[in-house]
Amino acid sequence: VLIETTRSDISGVVTPTEIQNLPVLNRTFAALTIVMPEARPVGNFDPTKTRIGNFAISGGDGRQLDVNVDGGDNKDNVVGSLIQNFAYESIQEFQVLQHRWTAESGRSVGGVVNVISKSGTNQLAGSGFGSFRSEQTRKLDFFELQRQAANSSFEKPEFRRQEFGGSLGGPIARNSLVFFGAIERFRGRSNNALTQTAFSQLSAIPGADVVSAIPTPYDDTLFTVKVDWNRGQNRSMFARLAYQDQSSPNDQIPVPATADVNNGNTNNTTNYSFVAGDTWTLSSSKLNQ
C-alpha cells in the first residue's frame, strides 16, 4: 500500500535478493544494513570485536542498537553493538526499525534489527562460494604511498584474504521435518607497513629490531544449523544453533603502525547461540468460538 494506516513505525526490510546479490566486505549482515536510510558504518567499542562489524542509525554511535536473531538477543549489554556474527549464507532476511517502533521492541534508542535465519524445504538444495584477494589486486594505501615516495625500493606488503563456504538444506521427513545448515571460513593475512618517519625513529633506538611491516593475521569460522518441525494442527517448532570462533593474533596494531611485531596482543573469542521456539496458530473460526 502507498500509505500505512495501521502502524506508525518507520522501518525497512533487506530482502533475500539483496542479501544474495549485493557485494559486502567480510560477508556480515552488519555491513549490509547500511543500505537502509539513516544507517551508516561505525567502529566497535570493544577491542575484542574489531572484526565483527557495527553500524549506527539516525546519527547514533552504534551503542544504542537492539539486535535480535530468530528472536534471540544478540546485543552486548556492556559496550553495545553486536555480540557475534552469523554465517552469511544462513541469513534469510532482516528488518531494520528506525523510528517509533512498537512496544514489542525495546532496549534501544538508536534502532532495532530483527534477523531471520533460513529454513530448509522439501527440496534438497545447497550453495557454495569462494573468493580470494592478494596484494596484486589492491592499491597502495595513503601511508604506503608515503613510504614508497621516500624509498623507491619499497614493496607492497603481503596481503591475502580468502573466504569460502556453503550451505545445504532439505527434508528429513517430507512435509514434517526439515533441516538447514551453513558454514563459512574467513582467513586473512595482511601486513601494516610502518611510515618512513616511524621506521627511522625506531631504527635509531640502540638494539631495536625494527620490522618494515607488522603482520595482523585473522581467522574466523562461522557455523549455523536449524531444524524446523511442522507438527500439524496449526503448530510448528524450530531449533537453531549458531557458532563463531575467531582468532586475531597480534591484534590492535594502529595504522600507521608505530611499534615492532611484539606490540600487539591476541584476541581469541568463541560464541554460541541457541534459540528454540514453539508456535501455535489459531484459525479465525476458533477465535470466533
Image (cartoon, grey):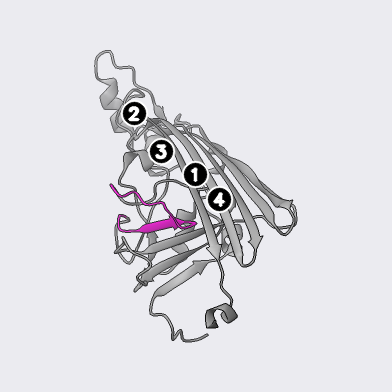
In this view, the residue farthest toward the front is 289
The answer to whether residue 240 is above or below residue 249 is: below
Q: Which residue is mark 3?
A: 144
The answer to whether residue 2 is above or below residue 75 is: below
Mark 2 is on which residue type? Answer: Gly
Nearer to the camera, 160 or 243: 243
Q: Nearer the viewer, mark 3 or mark 4?
A: 4
Q: How many marks?
A: 4
Contact between marks 1 and 2 (CB within 8 A): the answer is no
Which callout, 2 or 4, points at the residue further toward the start of the chain? 4
Magenta residues, start to end: 63-79
Q: Which residue is mark 2?
A: 264
Q: Residue at x 64, y 50 (%)?
A: 180
Q: Which residue is mark 4?
A: 239
Q: Residue at x 35, y 70 (%)?
A: 103
Residue 180 located left or right of residue 256: right
Mark 1 is on which residue type? Answer: Lys
Which callout, 1 or 3, points at the residue further toward the start of the chain? 1
Q: Residue at x 53, y 45 (%)?
A: 241
| Cα–Cα gap, marks 2 and 3 | 20 Å
| Cα–Cα gap, marks 2 and 4 | 39 Å
User: Residue 68 magenta-drawn?
Assistant: yes
Residue 188 located left or right of residue 7: right
Q: Main secondary structure of the magenta part?
A: loop
Which callout, 3 or 4, points at the residue further toward the start of the chain? 3
Is residue 87 among what the camera can see?
A: no
Q: Which residue is mark 1?
A: 139
